[in-house]
Image (cartoon, grey):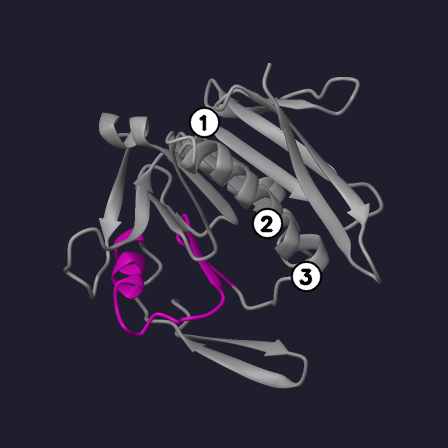
Amino acid sequence: MAQRHLILTEEEEDVRISIPADVFTYEGFQRWVDSRRFPESGRIDYLEGDVDVDLSPEELFTHNVVKVAIASKLYRLVGEGEIGNVFMTRTRVWSPVAEISVEPDVVAMFWSSLKAGRIRLVPAPFNKEPNRFSGIEGAVDLVVEIVSDSSVKKDTKRLPKLYARAGIPELWNVDARGRHLRFQIHTLQDGAYVAVEPDSEGWVRSPRLGVDFRLVRRRAPLISWRYTLEHRQP
């Protein structure tokens, strides 16, 4: 039976989200996203008939600043390089092929993919002015997922399979929670992701960008971490 309400508890406060009965199909979820009833906070993904709701706040130094470091470097390479554009936070990616509607931590799309019709921009539901869009449909060029305590299985097991089915050429996976920072680039080969092996200095090639990357973490003042996504041309 479809679940109409989902109650999540954050500390001592109940959070109630009203979920319509018909959202457990791709079309039904799309109607919900395009309605004024869709929640304005939290990450809510549709995964092959399942609705995944995560209202956990982003941890500052193992998630949020990592996302900023990666997105800012990718934007300099992709956006300022006039290859395409880079998005983060609340950027919805649709794939009818994989039956997913998700909000990755970082998304990169190339103008060449848009021109070729591999992706299309989804018009904003409530604003009919030109150049107002709410998401991207199709195989975006690159997605980044940063693991948090509430998303380990989803980020490392379920999403990679669905992103591969959607035809997304490259997936980056980052885990900054432990003593050792983990940064992996996966490239799509024969319908499945294959990890790109780093060299002896920790550089990993992005086949999609043709650039080597290395994510480093250093202690910043007081208790925080500072992250840098280094890059070098081959």
* Mark 1, other Cα within 10 Å: few <14 / some 14–19 / many ≥20: many
Q: Quadrant of residue 108?
A: top left
Q: Which tag is nearer the camera, tag 2 or tag 1?
A: 2
Q: Identify the mark nearer the N-term, 3 or 2.
A: 3
Q: Write the residue at 34% across / 70% down.
A: 38
Marks 1/3: CA–CA distance: 29 Å
Q: Write the residue at 30% across / 42% down.
A: 137
Magenta-colored span: 26-53
Q: Identify the mark nearer the N-term, 1 or 3.
A: 3
Is residue 37 highlighted in magenta?
yes
Dot 3: element: helix
x and y percentages locating residue 211 in the rendered image: 56, 22
In screen coordinates, is 59 left or right of 55?
right
Q: Identify the mark nearer the N-term, 2 or 1.
A: 2
In screen coordinates, is 218 left or right of 69?
right
Q: Is residue 158 visible?
A: no
Under mark 3, the amino acid is Leu
Q: Which tag is nearer the camera, tag 1 or tag 3?
A: 3
Q: Write the residue at 61% across / 85% down.
A: 13
Residue located beneath label 3 in the image: 60
Q: Which numbered marker is on residue 67?
A: 2
x and y percentages locating residue 128 in the rendered image: 14, 60
Quadrant containing the N terminus is: bottom left
Q: Write the residue at 32% across / 45% down.
A: 136
Marks 3/2: CA–CA distance: 10 Å
Residue located beneath label 1 in the image: 169
Q: Confirm or deny contact between disc 1 and disc 3 (CB under 8 A).
A: no
